[in-house]
Amino acid sequence: MADHTPDDDQFGDDDNLAENLESLDDDLVEQRADTLRRGLDDYDLDEADFEMLETAAEGPEAIRYLPTLPVVAIVGRPNVGKSALVNRIIGRREAVVEDTPGVTRDRVSYRAEWNGRHFTLVDTGGWEPDAKGIDASVAAQAEVAMDLADAVMFVVDANVGATSTDEHVVRLLRKVKKPVYLVANKVDDVRQEPNIADLWSLGLGEPRPVSALHGRGVADLLDLVLDKLPEVSAVAKREVGGPRRVAIVGRPNVGKSSLLNKAAGEERVVVNDIAGTTRDPVDEQVEIAGKVWRFVDTAGIRRRVHMQQGADFYASLRTSAALEKAEVGVVVIDVSEPISEQDVRIVDLVLQSGRALVLAFNKWDLLDDERRWFLEREIEQDLGHVSWAPRVNISAQTGRHLEKLVPALELALESWDTRIATGKFNAFLAELVAEHPHPLRGGKQPRVLFGTQASSRPPTFVLFTTGFLDPGYRRFIQRRLREIYGFEGSPIVVNMRVRERRKR
């Protein structure tokens, strides 16, 4: 998601883009955009394109939100083929597949599509391959998946039959008021189909035989699941109005709870030197510098789910659950220690969730000059891809500079809400492409036909093009958008729709 990497430098920014755009007449800009839009009628557009273009006709005040895609979670004990099923559904080999139980450690989300319907597929894992705790651990990740999903696929190995672990999870699944599908995997041919008869005893209805490895039965399974799946997720539904929603996230023991307590002005969260002591959900209305904010549930998982095993898995789940309900993520980083891989991973979780981002560097009062020098190098190297995020240097313990959090949050949310008028966006694209054309690829040069902002929260732009734009060129467009329009604290998404001229 980095906006600026060396391969977008080749396009340069030694131009007068800002001045040129400033000098353009607003009426002329709108007329040009209208002409470009009409020019698209010569190209093969689908129904989704026309729906998208309707937003182009609306003014910049008409903020559109992309609907939250419905979520399907895949759960089951280790080594039943969950990741293989994920790969089969998304049509590419992305989930880690290994013949060792417990390889999947994190909850990983993928965007999937079937028969024109889009949904989010969540591959769960997170247990340690430790026989003692495996029942509780698998049940826990199933419970988490149920909390955060609209439908659940419960995968069992048809050749092994129902195990005590499976039965343990089923007791939870029976209580769920969401569709649950019993998926009997590893039924590679007709001869293995009789094996699924025993699975009726689990009490989850008809077992659905599939072979994730060969694809057998997967299409029928998806037809069945999507028939009951809502168009928009009921779990992560959008709330409108009221105080803006903030998730305080970060690795264990960086000072998240201290920050919330100081902001609230009282002890609301247990603070302990032992990492990972936050257990109960925290969902608080807090006033900082005269403004009310809603700090969303940063635990996100019920107390009985917690255990020592799979700590990283639960930390990432808590973060994802909090971000689902938030509008902006404040990533707390402990500056007294080097920036870690886990810090970067949490920043990337905020980016993947499409939320606004603020970086809070905690324990700033403990810095000496030498550590400050090293910290700046670390920020440059490890957080260079989010150099656009507002930074606040605070001490959660003493409350120092806590009031600086408010302007940072307001700036990030304002960027996240921003919508650029279609005329202005196309004028920006025209000026940019004229100064810095896309490189030739195979003797052809892809052209940008028209652009529109499809939605806000986060700002999402769609470019109709005659060919595929290099990732470096797309990053260049993102970087220049930031230079002209700000977008401080918000990720920007630039999508392409490659369209061919209609045959007459």
Image (spheres, rainbow, N blue to C red):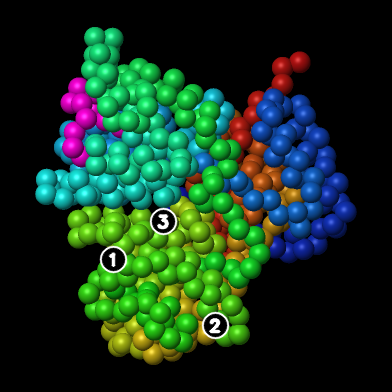
Q: Which residue is mark 1?
A: 340
Q: Is residue 299 visible?
A: yes
Q: Which residue is mark 3?
A: 320
Q: Is residue 320 magenta?
A: no
Q: Secondary structure at mark 1?
A: loop
**Amino acid found under the numbered disc labelled 3:** Ser
Q: Quadrant of residue 292?
A: bottom right
Instruction: Left or right? Give the position of 273 relative to 300.
Output: left
Q: Nearer the viewer, residue 390 or 35?
A: 390
Task: Say which element carries label 2.
Answer: strand
**Distance of mark 2 from mark 1, alpha carbons?**
29 Å
Q: Confirm or deny contact between disc 2 and disc 3 (CB under 8 A).
A: no
- Identity of the residue drawn at 51% across and 62% down: 326
Mark 1: few, some, or many residues within 10 Å (few <14, many ≥20)? Answer: few
Q: Amino acid at mark 2?
A: Ile
Task: Report the span colored magenta.
Answer: 155-165
Residue at left 52%, top 35%?
A: 229
Amino acid type at image mark 1: Ser
Q: Nearer the viewer, residue 133 or 36?
A: 133
Instruction: Name the residue carrying label 2.
Output: 288
